[in-house]
Amino acid sequence: MATVRLSDVRKSFGSVETIKGVDIEIGDGEFVVFVGPSGCGKSTLLRMIAGLEDITSGTVEIDGQVVNDIEPKDRGIAMVFQTYAIFPHMTVRENVAFGLTIKGAPKEEKERRVAEAARILQMEHLLDRRPSELSGGQRQRVAIGRAIVRDPKVFLFDEPLSNLDAALRMDMRMEIGKLHQSLKASMIYVTHDQVEAMTLADRIVVLKDGKVMQAGPPMDLYHEPANLFVAGFLGAPSMNFIPVNVDGVDGDHVTISSPSVDRMTVRGRGREFTVGQTATLGVRPQYIRAAAGTDGMLHGHVELTERLGSETVVDVALPTGGKIIAALPEDRILAHGSEASFEFDPSQAHLFPEVER
Amino acid sequence: MDRTLPASQRGSAMASRLTISNRAGWGFALPAFALITIFIILPFFFAFYLSLTNQRLISPNPTQFVGLENYRDLLGLSVITLGPERDENGAAVLNELGDLTYPRVRTVTRNPDFPQYRGMREWFRWRSGENARVVIASDVVFWKALANTLTFVFFIVPLQGGGALLLALLINQKLRGINFFRTIYFMPVVISIVVISLLWRFIYDGGDGLLNNILGALSFGLFPPVDWLGQPETALGSIIVMSAWQAVGFHMVIWLSGLQTISPTLYEVAAIEGASKWQTFRYVTWPGLRNTAVLVLIVITMQAFALFAQIDVMTNGGPLDSTQTLVFQAVERGYGKQDISGGSTISVLLFFIVLLISLTQRYLTRDRS
Ligand SMILES: Nc1ncnc2c1ncn2[C@@H]1O[C@H](COP(=O)(O)OP(=O)(O)O)[C@@H](O)[C@H]1O
Ligand SMILES: [Mg+2]
């Protein structure tokens, strides 16, 4: 178990800067998830922590020690890759024991540690198989077993579930969560899947274009996104964004209106607004309700409804163009093309000074 | 599928596209197939037929079917034991050097008491107690050629395969100017083997050759010049070294392609686990090269059995038959001596030897998992 601290970490490939100054602190035993769209630099960041990629500038500390110039093997890390990276010519047992073989550990120790890892991952029955005889989930389990045997201070996961099918991904996600609870080790987990981030993380770090957008506990990020990007990235379906005009500012209370939304006052949450500017109103689909008649504050045409039983997802075309999604918490029939009116609690809405794109 | 319908009306567009592309596929394969048939498959059967006859390249006499006589003439091999010459008291006669003396081999091979040894000549002999054991063969040159070919294969496989792997490992790094070395090592492959053989004849020259000059300079003249190709002891070795050098670049490229199929992530795992260079090779690289290794092994073996051009240009099988090889003998007999049935017989034997060795290699290197 250990702490990890990144201070103004930068990485350039040639003249292209990929990581543009990242500061992150990871506490002892914490489960931190780096999340962001593909190509934002998550893997690069993780690989710099592992020592597989040089650090162009800034420092990475593990347990208070700067590891910039320390070999991967001496950093006390173990890594699990998206592509499993287990050796096809070795049995599961040999794969899991690989690190011990390299160190020349005695046979009894190998047996004991492999058995322990196999017990934790419930794969005792797989030990004598070869990787070609395993499913994707089982292969990833072998890779995790190899990491456990290393007994690292920090576990690094680079999209470990991305090659698995949806059902398996959910099972494995829970197992990784359980693994963290039982090992209580520090873990850094990279994914582009916000559901994995939300369910696994003690703390999420949202990355975009090599910069940290926001870091904090999942629910903080969900309820108080710092910017449009984080607001749109976390939560499914994504938050609706509606362009609005700022009509008045009174301290933290901002009055807004638009052809699609009736005039209302929402909280500015500490952000600066000036009268007359264009801003973006964000409302999560789950916070939108169907209004009786035309009483609601949001108006549009029903374009598509998806009835999921417990929930009805409605695509609504706004009169100004653009589209919002409402996730109604009941089974409801809405005719295609019909006029509909929706309402939401302004206190659950977010107002951002930026405009989308 | 209803074949009576015109193509445009067939049920599935997919199926019709498949039949069309199938015809195109055969079309593309046809030229190669025809060439292989004409120049490889038919000649093979023709050689097999010729090896059972007494056909000569140009002959007024009609061809006669002789069964396996050609094979018997080639393969006939026996070991005879000669007792030392003794004087009338029964004591062994020594020559002036104090060695035992033995009767000449022709006292046996020309002895009407031993018709089975008729026409055989000595290949080599060794001492066994007082007696000499002499291996006699009905075609000594063939046996020498076979032994030389096997020796060549035995040394060239590790030398060329191992050397090529070493080069591939060196070349497979991200270094500045690495392409320069890739080109250099590959260059001998694209140059005609005849040209290379001529060049190496100068290198190996006994008087003023490059090799003798270099060795002389390095040893400050202490190293006496050697006629590398002119002595039975060094000729085959010289040809082995030169042949390994010539084709090493080709196999380097094959190894290289194998190396590049190994996932870089596996190397990262090895780095994280702290594997040394040797351990990384042993646990990651070598297992990843398994299939490539089988390919290289078989290709080198087959090429080695076909050793001809170097011999033809550099030594003509000499000195004292020390660089005779099977293919050289096949050509020499078939065309040089116009004994086309004898040459064919060697070719057929070579085919079975190579087949046997390839099958053995395949079996030994099979995937056991
Ligand atoms: N070895 C490399 N050389 C050059 N560019 C790279 C290299 N590795 C990654 N990049 C670039 O850095 C960016 C971030 O990559 P990566 O960290 O893999 O993204 P992510 O894991 O978030 O999808 C990408 O634009 C990618 O093209
Ligand atoms: Mg990645």
Image (cartoon, coloured by chain):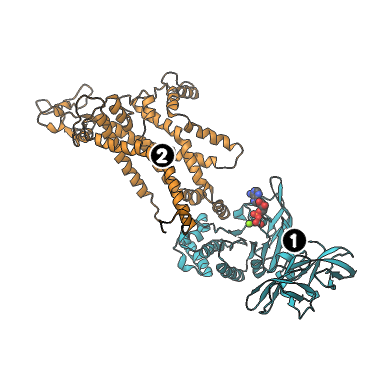
Q: Nearer the viewer, residue A48 or B190?
A: B190
Which amino acid type is shown beneath numbered disc 1? Met
Residue A45 location in percent, x, y? 67, 56
- The chain coloured cyan is A
Q: Position of residue A292 (x, y in %)?
A: 76, 81
> Left or right: B279 with respect to B325?
right
Mark 2: C-beta under 8 Å from nearest atom of ligand 1: no
Q: Secondary structure at mark 2?
A: helix
Q: Which residue is mark 1?
A: A213
Tell me if I can see residue A88 in this picture.
no
Q: Quadrant of residue B51?
A: top left
Q: Which chain is orange?
A: B
Position of residue A16 in the picture relative to residue B362 (left or right): right
Q: Nearer the viewer, mark 1 or mark 2?
A: 2
Tag 1, which chain?
A: A
Quick check: B359 above or below B125?
A: below
Count neighbours of disc 1 (C-alpha within 10 A) and say few if under 14, some if 14 to 19, many if 20 or more. some
Tell me if mark 2 has few (under 14), some (14-19) or many (20+) residues whose alpha carbon lies within 10 angstroms of its own: few
Q: Position of residue A315 (x, y in %)?
A: 70, 70
The answer to whether residue A33 is visible is: yes
Q: Secondary structure at mark 1?
A: strand
Residue bearing mark 2: B31
Q: Which residue is more in the foreground, A230 or A357?
A: A357
Could you say where residue B189 lies in the image, as x and y percent from the top left? Answer: 47, 33
Say yes or no: labels 1 and 2 on the same chain.
Answer: no
Choose top left, top right, bottom left or bottom right for residue A291.
Answer: bottom right
Name the quarter where the N terminus of chain A is drawn: bottom right
B33 vs A11: above or below:
above
Left of B22 or right of it: where is B273?
Answer: right
Subunit that carries the residue with mark 2: B
